[in-house]
Amino acid sequence: MARLKFILIAILFSASTHAQEFIMVNDQYCSSDSLPLQGQLEIFHPNGEVSRVLNFENGYLHQLALFYNENGKLTMSGSYHENKRDGIWLTWDLDGKVTGRAEFDQGQKIGEWFIQGYYSESSYRLYFANDKLLVARMEE
């Protein structure tokens, strides 16, 4: 189960980590002059490729978020509502194949999740309700 948690974290939270041009103030993302972010923000990898495209409303992550690798390939997409993941989130491999599907309801894990193993052909089906894992199955 620990390996499964690691795979979940690696797939759903991977992104570039270089310096950002915003700060957190009372749970809101703000510009360096403490004004809440509004609209679309693009964050770039050190090589100049887009890393993330995020949308903000009154300083909160809101609506579609897109994540790209250093070669410009889409690796993850999903939506936020007031800084919480909401709706369907998808991950892709370098060939454009869907490798993960997760569902959230205002930040809570819900429904059926699918995760393709990163280093193997194994995949996992997980079932959540109210942010609690009910069933986890490995598939070959």
Image (tube, grey):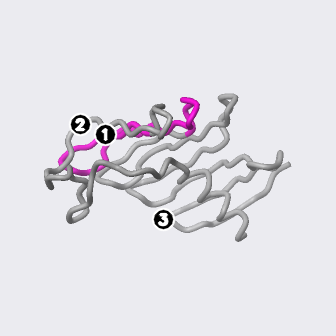
In front of the other: label 3 or label 1?
Answer: 1
Circle 2 residue: 39
Whether residue 53 is in magenta: the answer is yes
Circle 3 residue: 130
Q: Position of residue 131 (x, y in %)?
A: 50, 65
Instruction: List the single residue furthest toward the right.
Output: 140
- SS label for mark 2: strand
* Residue in the image at 60% along x and 44% along y: 101
Return the mark for residue 55: 1
Q: Position of residue 110 (x, y in %)?
A: 52, 56
In front of the other: label 2 or label 3?
Answer: 2
User: Pointer 2 and pointer 1: residues touching (CB < 8 Å)?
Assistant: yes
In the image, the segment drawn in magenta is: 52-75
Q: Using the numbered discs, state the Cα–Cα distance from disc 2 to disc 1 in whole angstroms.
A: 5 Å
Q: Using the rendered view, name the quadrant where residue 95 is placed.
A: top right
Is 116 on the left-hand or right-hand side of 69? right
Q: Quick one: 106 or 95, which is closer to the camera?
A: 95
Q: Using the numbered discs, state the Cα–Cα distance from disc 2 to disc 3 in whole angstroms.
A: 30 Å
* Residue in the image at 79% along x and 56% along y: 138
- Dot 2: few (<14), some (14–19), or many (≥20) neighbours within 10 Å? few
Vertical arrangement, residue 63 with respect to residue 10, above or below? above
Q: Position of residue 51 (x, y in %)?
A: 46, 38
| Pointer 3 or 1: first along the chain | 1
Q: Using the rendered view, name the quadrant where residue 23 is placed.
A: bottom left
User: What type is the residue that disc 1 sits on?
Assistant: Asn
| Pointer 2 or 3: first along the chain | 2
- SS label for mark 3: loop
Vertical arrangement, residue 55 with respect to residue 84, above or below? above
Give the main secondary structure, helix, strand or loop, of the magenta stretch: strand
- SS label for mark 1: strand
User: What type is the residue that disc 3 sits on?
Assistant: Asn
